[in-house]
């Protein structure tokens, strides 16, 4: 998992018992397929996603995707826009607007980039509403359908709550989505210079084809040199090129849902049930 970066939403020390309970809840959230959906795609597909959205993900990442005629999903926490830490500067508000105008998907990453397992139901709802309000001010009418857990951290209660609000929630656990998937915790493959070797890329592309799967790449910055949780422009370009040469459809998460035959209306009654459950936790 990605550790929390110093200086941004740093938490106070957690008592041992609370740490234990959080760990149990986190494992339950990971292994309980709480929003199952049977994929019905006709062919393999790939999505490129960006967390936190450093300005290099906009300047380099979006530009590279557009060079290939494709669009990505950018998970934004508007409360951090324009801020900087030891790794990068976060995308500015005008750049968020430009991403949306260019046809990229804007996803929710909470408002303040907070570990959701530390929140109660009311605070979680406030985070989502604040982010949605800010994004609507920037982009006009905007329906947020995709969520990504900051730091990859989650609890069962917050997972149930978030999956009732969003069509998909994406994590950081590695794997190819295929067959019956959990829309409450989509799997990913790291698009990092330090982990995505040519051999691994070849393997995951082969597995995606064999399983008729949905391969979701994720990264943070797209810089030269990249951070330890980012990729270089050269790696992103080479990866997109390999995906296109393999003949895979490349779509944002919102369009991937259409390709696998998902309809939000089919899940409405189930979402109401899980929302009621999570609100009491």
Image (spheres, rainbow, N blue to C red):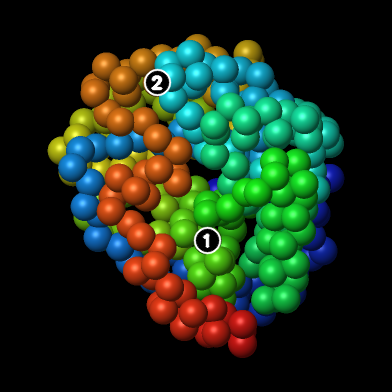
In the rendered structure, find residue 166 and report the number of the disc placed on it.
Answer: 1
With 28 as the anchor, is 162 left or right in this view?
Answer: right
Between 145 and 193, which is closer to the camera in this rendering?
145
With 54 as the anchor, is 197 left or right in this view?
Answer: left
Q: Residue 280, percent across and down?
A: 61, 87
In which image quadrant can residue 227 be found?
top right
Between 5 and 47, which is closer to the camera in this rendering?
47
Between 262 and 55, which is closer to the camera in this rendering?
262
Which element carries disc 2, helix, strand or loop?
A: helix
In the rendered structure, find residue 240 and report the number of the disc placed on it.
Answer: 2
Graded by Cα atoms within 10 Å as few (under 14), some (14 to 19) or many (20 or more), the crowding at tag 2 reads many
Residue 145 vs 27, above or below: the answer is above
In the rendered structure, find residue 225 and report the number of the disc placed on it.
Answer: none
Q: How many marks?
A: 2
Q: Residue at point 58% right, 38% down? A: 74
In which image quadrant can residue 38 be found?
bottom left
Q: Residue at point 50% right, 66% down? A: 163
Graded by Cα atoms within 10 Å as few (under 14), some (14 to 19) or many (20 or more), the crowding at tag 1 reads many
* Eye-nearest disc, 2 or 1: 1
> Can residue 174 be seen?
no
């Amino acid at each position: 998992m990605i550790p929390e970066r110093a200086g941004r939403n740093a938490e106070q020390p957690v008592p041992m018992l609370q740490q234990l309970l959080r760990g149990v809840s986190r494992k339950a959230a990971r292994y309980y397929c709480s929003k199952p959906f049977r994929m019905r795609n006709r062919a393999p597909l790939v999505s490129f996603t960006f967390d936190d959205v450093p300005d290099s993900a906009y300047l380099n990442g979006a530009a590279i995707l557009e060079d290939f005629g494709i669009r990505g999903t950018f998970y934004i926490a508007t409360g951090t826009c324009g801020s900087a830490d030891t790794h990068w500067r976060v995308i500015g508000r005008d750049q968020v607007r430009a991403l949306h105008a260019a046809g990229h998907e804007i996803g929710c990453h909470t408002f303040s980039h907070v570990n959701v397992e530390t929140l109660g139901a009311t605070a979680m709802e406030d985070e989502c509403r604040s982010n949605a309000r800010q994004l609507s001010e920037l982009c006009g009418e905007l329906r947020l359908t995709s969520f990504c857990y900051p730091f990859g951290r989650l609890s069962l209660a917050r997972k149930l709550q978030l999956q009732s609000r969003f069509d998909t929630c994406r994590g950081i656990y590695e794997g190819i989505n295929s067959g019956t998937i959990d829309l409450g915790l989509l799997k990913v493959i790291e698009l990092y210079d330090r982990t995505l070797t040519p051999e691994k890329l070849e393997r995951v592309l082969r597995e995606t084809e064999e399983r008729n799967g949905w391969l979701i790449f994720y990264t943070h910055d797209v810089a030269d040199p990249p951070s330890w949780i980012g990729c270089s422009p050269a790696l992103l370009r080479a990866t997109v090129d390999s995906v296109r040469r393999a003949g895979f459809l490349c779509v944002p998460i919102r369009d991937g849902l259409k390709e696998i035959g998902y309809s939000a209306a089919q899940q409405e009654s189930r979402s109401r049930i899980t929302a009621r459950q999570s609100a009491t936790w």
